[in-house]
Image: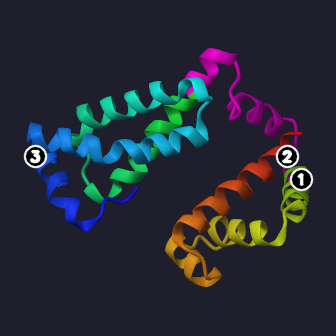
């Protein structure tokens, strides 16, 4: 959700404390936040996640040091809220870190390397490629998108799906 250049003055004014600009910024951000929440939340939690993200934006925008980081910050906020609401509603967290820690603790370094190698090999080539470029070659998303001939959004989506598939393979 990158704000178009014509909306940057609104963002800067809201960051500076302008109440009217903040209201306008919240209206501008709401559709993107809602779309993101619809993909990451249970359907019953979408409105709550959107509302919480907008409240966080209104309360904490002044503390954001780099305004260009707004979209990533907002999406992380929505994602956290979706996870929180999902844990409450279903008593389920798809990213259960204790499960990951338990899995890692039960293996030595050689087993971990072998399992990781198998997980990577299980991925379709286009997913494996983006994962290796990001996590092993440490390229930026812009560099990955250029190298693969994708948009940055498509590269991010592909990376997210690759990580999800690798995690499912490892924890199954």
Q: Are marks 1 and 2 in contact (CB under 8 Å)?
A: yes
The x and y percentages for residue 29 are 33, 46
Name the image quarter holding the N terminus. Answer: bottom left
Circle 3: is it few (<14), some (14-19), or many (20+) Cα within 10 Å? Answer: few
- Which secondary structure lies at badge 2? helix
| In front: label 1 or label 3 | 3
For label 1, the residue is 115
- Which secondary structure lies at badge 1? helix
**Of residues 103 and 46, the one drawn nearer to the viewer in this rendering:** 46
Circle 1: is it few (<14), some (14-19), or many (20+) Cα within 10 Å? Answer: some
Circle 2: is it few (<14), some (14-19), or many (20+) Cα within 10 Å? Answer: some
The x and y percentages for residue 65 are 24, 51
| In front: label 1 or label 2 | 2
For label 2, the residue is 170
| In front: label 3 or label 2 | 3
The Cα atoms of the two marked residues, 1 and 3, are separated by: 50 Å
Which of the marked residues, 1 or 2, is nearer the chain's N terminus?
A: 1
The Cα atoms of the two marked residues, 3 and 2, are separated by: 46 Å
**Of residues 47 and 148, the one drawn nearer to the viewer in this rendering:** 47
Residue 156 counted in the magenta span: no
The x and y percentages for residue 148 are 64, 80
Which of the marked residues, 1 or 3, is nearer the chain's N terminus?
A: 3
Q: Classify residue 10 as left or right of residue 151.
A: left
Asked if 127 appears above or below 63 in the picture, the reply is below
For label 3, the residue is 16
Magenta segment: 84-110
Name the colour scheme.
rainbow
Asked which quadrant contains residue 157, the reply is bottom right
Asked if 86 appears above or below 170 in the picture, the reply is above
Which of the marked residues, 3 or 2, is nearer the chain's N terminus?
A: 3
């Amino acid at each position: 959700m990158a704000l178009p250049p014509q909306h940057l003055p609104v963002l800067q004014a809201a960051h500076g404390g302008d109440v009217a600009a903040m209201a306008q910024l919240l209206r501008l951000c709401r559709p993107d936040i809602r779309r993101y929440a619809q993909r990451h939340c249970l359907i019953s939690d979408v409105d709550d996640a959107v509302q919480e993200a907008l409240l966080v934006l209104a309360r904490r925008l002044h503390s954001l040091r780099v305004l260009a980081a707004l979209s990533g910050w907002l999406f992380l906020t929505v994602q956290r809220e979706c996870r929180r609401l999902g844990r409450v509603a279903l008593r389920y967290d798809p990213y259960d870190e204790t499960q990951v820690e338990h899995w890692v603790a039960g293996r030595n370094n050689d087993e971990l390397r072998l399992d990781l190698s198998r997980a990577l090999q299980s991925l379709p080539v286009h997913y494996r490629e983006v994962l290796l470029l990001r996590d092993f070659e440490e390229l930026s998303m812009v560099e990955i998108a250029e190298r693969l001939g994708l948009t940055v959004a498509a590269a991010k989506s592909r990376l997210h799906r690759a990580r999800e598939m690798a995690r499912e393979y490892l924890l199954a």
